[in-house]
Image (cartoon, helix red, strand yellow):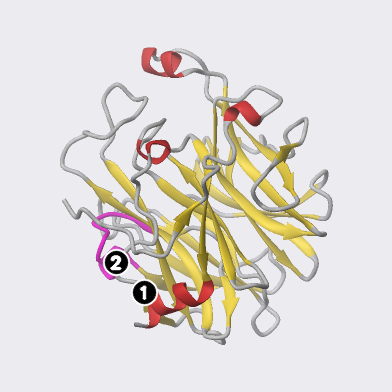
Amino acid sequence: MIQAVELKGIKRHPKNPILTKDDVPYESSLVFNAGVTKFNGKYVMTFRNDYGFTKADFRAGKGQVETNIGLAYSDNGIDWEVSPKPCFSFVRHGANRAYDPRLTVIDSRCYMCFAVDGDHGVCGGIAVTDDFDHFEILHITEPDNRNMVLFPEKFGGEFVRLDRPFSMYGKGGELFDTWISRSKDGVYWGKHRFLFGADDIPFCNSKTGPAAPPIKTNKGWLTTFHAVEILPSPELDAWDPKGWNKIYYAGIMLLDPHDPSKIIAIADAPILAPREEYEMKGFRGSAIFPGGMILEDSGEVKIYYGAADTVMALAITDVDYLLKLCLK
């Protein structure tokens, strides 16, 4: 067991969890893995909303798990008001649900990456919106790929994204890697390159992947990632009566300001490791998964993360602290 201990200097907000199923004005069982950004003068959150079952239902093998993507707004990034209905779903061409949204503002438009489950596997999708009422679907990947995030700037006129393909062939098991690719229009993607893998992360013995979209600093692009430790036995809290054996950590790395396919440094310990009850107990306990990271003008960084695949939480830190973690 790795027993990773998070680095100091990250403070969980005293109002955690900042969004739960009880805040949603329509059917909801779990609220997590949200994308968060600033758009048109407001903090905006699109969150994964699973519904149609209870803990007792799930344990008994009853109920039908359904998913949509909800929408919430905030004036301060802490207190959220959920819109009266979901803002997005994706049921077409063999797909049966969309989930795990990530938000990035590029050239005054808001792009949403999301995952898609369907008859032919798991895919990633990219949509763009100006009002969160209407979404234009730009791209759906081939299976199997997910955890896609976009950089908030173009490089040489091209979009750049991070993603995590997870073919069971090749390396085998769940040693999944993070890749980077480019596109001129957001529709057709290529120039795929390996970025980093589980072997590069000292607190990981399984899969890695992108988390929140990167933020720009004077030293380069800070980006969070998720890293998974698999335990020998299913000893963690979970709604599944068989238990759960995966710990999800949040890490931080610094990418080159001009060529984000080059890694400057990776912090050698997680910035967030499960420790609070709302992170340790839930649908899948001991899981932390950042989906949004906002750099304020003051230098404060807000990191929004799903906790135990059950609620949304917020951690506060400083951009200089995150840079020191990488550059030391």
Task: Check disc 1 and report the residue beneath it.
Answer: 266
Inter-mark Cα distance, 1 to 2:
8 Å
Looking at the image, residue 112 lies above or below residue 284? below
Q: Position of residue 174 (x, y in %)?
A: 29, 51
Question: Of the numbered discs in the image, which one, if any, rests on residue 201?
Answer: 2
Q: Which residue type carries mark 2?
A: Ile
Q: Residue at point 76% right, 31% down?
A: 85
Left or right, residue 193 beside residue 47: left
- Look at the magenta stretch and give its main secondary structure: loop
Residue range of the region highlighted in magenta in the rendering: 197-208
Q: Residue at point 74% right, 46% down?
A: 73
Question: Of the numbered discs in the image, which one, if any, rests on residue 35?
Answer: none
Of residues 21 and 145, the one drawn nearer to the viewer in this rendering: 21
Q: Which residue type carries mark 1?
A: Ile
Of residues 280 and 47, the one drawn nearer to the viewer in this rendering: 280
Q: Position of residue 176 (x, y in %)?
A: 34, 57
Q: Is residue 256 visible?
A: yes
Picture quadrant of residue 62: top left
The residue tagged with tag 1: helix, strand or loop?
strand
- Quadrant holding the C terminus: bottom left
Looking at the image, residue 188 lies above or below residue 130? below
